[in-house]
Amino acid sequence: NTSGRRENIPGAGGILAMGILSIVFSMGFLGPIMGIITLATSAGKVKLYREDPDRYEERSFKQLNAGRTCGIIGLSLTGLAIIIVLMVVAGH
């Protein structure tokens, strides 16, 4: 980047949106899929940022991290729901 301006990490906003949606839909079929896609996609973006942090806006890195965190929370809620369902089914 020769202009001196920092750019956004490509797809950081989308990763944040997918992470949030993974929480919203964590009790359904779409939530875990969105959570997995969020984590898989964000891994490459984090690597991209770490290779050249001066190239990218810190704000977009924070969006990326927030999306990853939401994806982890969404997957955790899905796992918790599965455990509760298995306990209920096993109890009857």
Image: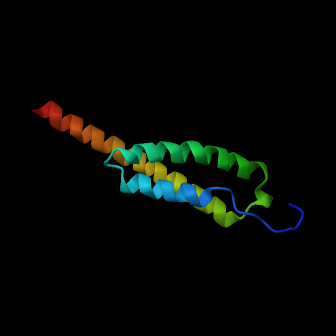
**Chosen colour scheme:** rainbow
Left or right placement of residue 88 versus residue 4 in this view: left
Residue that sits furthest to the right in the current view: 2
Q: Residue at x 13, y 33 (%)?
A: 91
Left or right placement of residue 78 versus residue 58 in this view: left
Left or right placement of residue 50 versus residue 20 in this view: right
Please identify the quarter of the rendering in which residue 61 is found: bottom right
Please identify the quarter of the rendering in which residue 43 is found: top right
Q: Which quadrant is the N terminus positioned in?
A: bottom right
**What is the x, y in percent for residue 81?**
28, 44
Q: Residue at x 48, y 54 (%)?
A: 19
**What is the x, y in percent for residue 63?**
59, 61
Count up the numbered dots.
0
Q: Where 92 sits versus 68, above or below?
A: above
Please identify the quarter of the rendering in which residue 58 is found: bottom right
Q: Residue at x 66, y 44 (%)?
A: 44
**What is the x, y in percent for residue 49?**
72, 52
Left or right placement of residue 3 versus residue 39 in this view: right
Q: Which quadrant is the C terminus positioned in?
A: top left
